[in-house]
Image (cartoon, grey):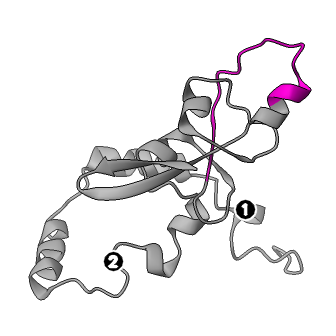
Amino acid sequence: MGKHLFKSGELKKITFCCQDCGGLICIKTAIHGNGRCYSCRIKDKESNIQIKNITFCCQDCGNKIGSNSALYGDGRCAFCCRKKEKHPLFGKKHSLETKLKMSKSGVGHKVSKKVRLKISKSRKGKYCGKNSHNWNPNISNE
């Protein structure tokens, strides 16, 4: 069960899951109901507490995802979004014109002295001694 949404001409399917068991539920139950499937509501009939949180699940793997990813994103968890074939540029290459634009956008960009000092102060002492990537406890400082 799911709801198809249109966003900039694309057809998307959002899957809604039960708060308790993770089973699929319809959009009306998820948004206007208490976010639970029928069998979970029957089990807990005595409590009339309305659950305000809605659980959204990834379309591919079924893991829980946030509402922004489900409603405004592509309805997938962060792991599934990064898979090769799902990436928007999979199998495509930047044109020469685009590469030149990207190259030109960084040329001539200078960081001010004030910003460089701020970055320097924030990094002081963080990458020294045991925090350094070159740290070797077997080497003495003699």
Vertical order, 125 against 53 (above or below): below
Give whichever of 63, 106 is nearer the camera.
63
Q: CA distance from mark 2 to mark 1?
A: 37 Å
Give whichever of 64, 79 is nearer the camera.
64
Vertical order, 34 against 103 (above or below): above
Give the percent coordinates (x, y) of residue 59. Answer: 57, 60
- Circle count: 2
Indicate the quadrant containing the C terminus: top left, top right, bottom left or bottom right.
bottom right
Q: Residue at x 70, y 21 (%)?
A: 51
Give the percent coordinates (x, y) of residue 6. Answer: 31, 49
Q: Residue at x 71, y 16 (%)?
A: 50
43 sits to left or right of 124: right
80 sits to left or right of 8: right
Disc number lying in front (2 or 1): 2
63 sits to left or right of 88: right
Q: Residue at x 53, y 75 (%)?
A: 83
Looking at the rendering, the stretch of residues picked out in magenta corresponds to 41-57
